[in-house]
């Protein structure tokens, strides 16, 4: 286990480049097993979740080569016996992103094995969309009670019309990958339409798939017999871009974020502008100037500003933690409404301990009363509960008066590449230490 020691109060200045998008990387890397030919993926982030998935592909005998942030995958000799092994199932159970392997494996090889999810059975809400989609395509699920796994089989999937129960990003990705070889036409309504889903569909089309409706919530997939190799470049990570906007607003003396793919950020810049943060667009860069104060907007009728998450093109839930921390030093009050997850706001207890004025109304809502920089947060010792809360706590520690410690930083490493070195290059004082 490792920790960060953060000396607060140092100002950030300079230029930073966002990494490749984590969520897109997990999707397109899994898509490489849909063909026996080489698929090259560029701008792959060097982060824990992605590296673990790549190692899992190596374990099933996918050939992987690397040149800096460019990887080439060739799945021409996959070990099908290993795919059925208990060892493979255990490794998949330890890696959330491995769920995206089910669709490609089912599509190309007609079978997959999945560990029974903890708690409820396979109908557990967070995986419902995936498995209901597979069933609609004709897959059969059998519970192997001795191994405590579900065996999924289909000689060949058959295209159909389906209305997804929710616009799940990973569910949509999995169903699209399962559908590319399905016989006939598959129509997916209420599909997620995030830029990363668009990128996945574009890669699959470059490999020979026939997908239309890309960018909308109505996708049509005409099944094909075979896919071939292709080359693909991953977008900049919109969550990292948003994280850097938040850091620059709280502790920046002028920070430029390079090559952000502005057209794929959606309403993220506008969400920060609602907190009063100035953001200048310069080509495909964002520049966040030093701001002595930033004032939260109110609605036209004068009521308190509310910032909430929603499926794309709404605001991603992954940035609400960052927006909440940034609001602690604003002038004014804001209601943060986390609709899509139930535990992401519990980290605010740590911010309250640091002196933030936050009222946690319930697991989904928190009211932040900004200090207007009159009171700096206090340093403290914290533990990162997840990726996004971890980066939010890091931003708080950069602002705090004194030296803070954040434990369990492997959570931050799951989503942010070499974050301490990149921020130290801007003027931060962050040290990684072993516990």
Image: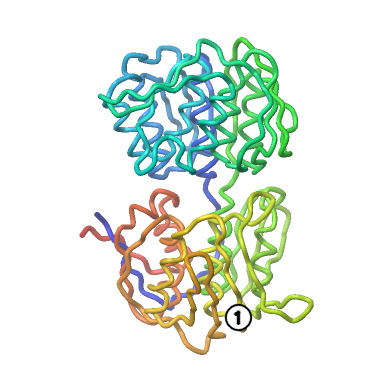
At 61% from the left edge and 62% from the top edge, which residue is drawn?
256
Quadrant position of the N terminus in the picture:
bottom left
116 versus 139 height, above or below: below
- The number of discs equals 1
At 66% from the left edge and 34% from the top edge, which residue is drawn?
163
Towards the viewer: 236 or 23: 23
269 with respect to 120 (left or right): right
Furthest toward the bottom, the residue is: 374
2 versus 237 height, above or below: below
Towards the viewer: 246 or 27: 27
141 versus 125 height, above or below: above
Q: Position of residue 407 (x, y in %)?
A: 29, 62
Q: Position of residue 141 (x, y in %)?
A: 44, 23
The answer to which image quadrant residue 14 occupies is: bottom right
Q: Position of residue 110 (x, y in %)?
A: 48, 14
The colour scheme used here is rainbow
Regarding mark 1 in the picture, which secondary structure is present there? strand
Q: Which residue in the structure is indicated by mark 1?
A: 333
At 44% from the left edge and 62% from the top edge, which residue is drawn?
389
At 54% from the left edge and 38% from the top edge, which residue is drawn?
170
Towards the viewer: 366 or 81: 366
Quadrant position of the C terminus in the picture:
bottom left
Furthest toward the right, the residue is: 300
């Amino acid at each position: 286990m490792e920790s960060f020691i953060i000396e607060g109060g140092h100002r950030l200045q300079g230029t930073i480049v966002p990494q490749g998008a984590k969520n897109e990387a997990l999707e397109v890397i899994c898509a490489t097993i849909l063909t026996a030919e080489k698929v090259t993926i560029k701008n792959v982030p060097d982060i824990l979740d992605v590296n673990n998935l790549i190692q899992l592909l190596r374990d099933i005998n996918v050939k992987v080569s690397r040149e800096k942030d460019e990887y080439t995958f060739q799945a021409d000799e996959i070990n099908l016996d290993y795919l059925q092994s208990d060892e493979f199932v255990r490794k998949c159970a330890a890696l959330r992103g491995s769920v995206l392997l089910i669709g490609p494996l089912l599509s190309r090889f007609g079978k997959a094995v999945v560990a029974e999810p903890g708690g409820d059975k396979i109908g557990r809400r967070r995986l419902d969309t995936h498995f209901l989609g597979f069933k609609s395509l004709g897959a059969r699920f059998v519970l192997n009670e001795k191994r405590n796994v579900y065996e999924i089989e289909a000689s060949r999937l058959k295209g159909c019309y389906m209305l997804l129960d929710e616009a799940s990003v990973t569910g949509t990705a999995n169903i699209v990958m399962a559908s590319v070889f399905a016989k006939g036409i598959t129509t997916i309504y209420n599909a997620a339409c995030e830029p990363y889903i668009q990128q996945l569909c574009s890669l699959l089309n470059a490999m020979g798939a026939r997908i239309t409706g890309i960018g909308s919530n109505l996708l049509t997939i005409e099944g094909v017999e075979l896919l071939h190799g292709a080359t693909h470049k991953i977008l900049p990570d919109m969550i990292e871009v948003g994280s850097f906007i938040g850091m620059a607003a709280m502790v920046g003396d002028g920070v430029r974020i390079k090559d952000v793919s502005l057209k794929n950020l959606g309403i993220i810049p506008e969400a920060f502008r609602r907190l009063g943060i100035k953001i200048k667009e310069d080509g495909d860069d964002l520049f966040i100037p030093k701001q002595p104060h930033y004032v939260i907007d109110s609605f036209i009728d004068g009521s308190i500003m509310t910032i909430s998450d929603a499926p794309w093109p709404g605001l991603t839930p992954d940035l609400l933690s960052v927006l909440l921390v940034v609001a602690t030093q604003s002038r004014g009050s804001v209601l943060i409404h986390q609709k899509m997850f139930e535990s992401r706001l519990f980290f605010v207890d740590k911010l309250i301990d640091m002196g933030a004025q936050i009222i946690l109304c319930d697991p989904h809502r928190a009211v932040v009363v900004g200090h207007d920089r009159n009171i700096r947060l206090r340093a403290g010792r914290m533990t990162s509960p997840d990726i996004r809360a971890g980066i939010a706590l890091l931003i708080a520690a950069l602002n705090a008066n004194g030296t803070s410690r954040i434990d369990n930083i492997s959570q931050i490493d799951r989503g942010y590449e070499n974050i301490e070195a990149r921020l130290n290059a801007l003027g931060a004082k962050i040290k990684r230490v072993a516990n």
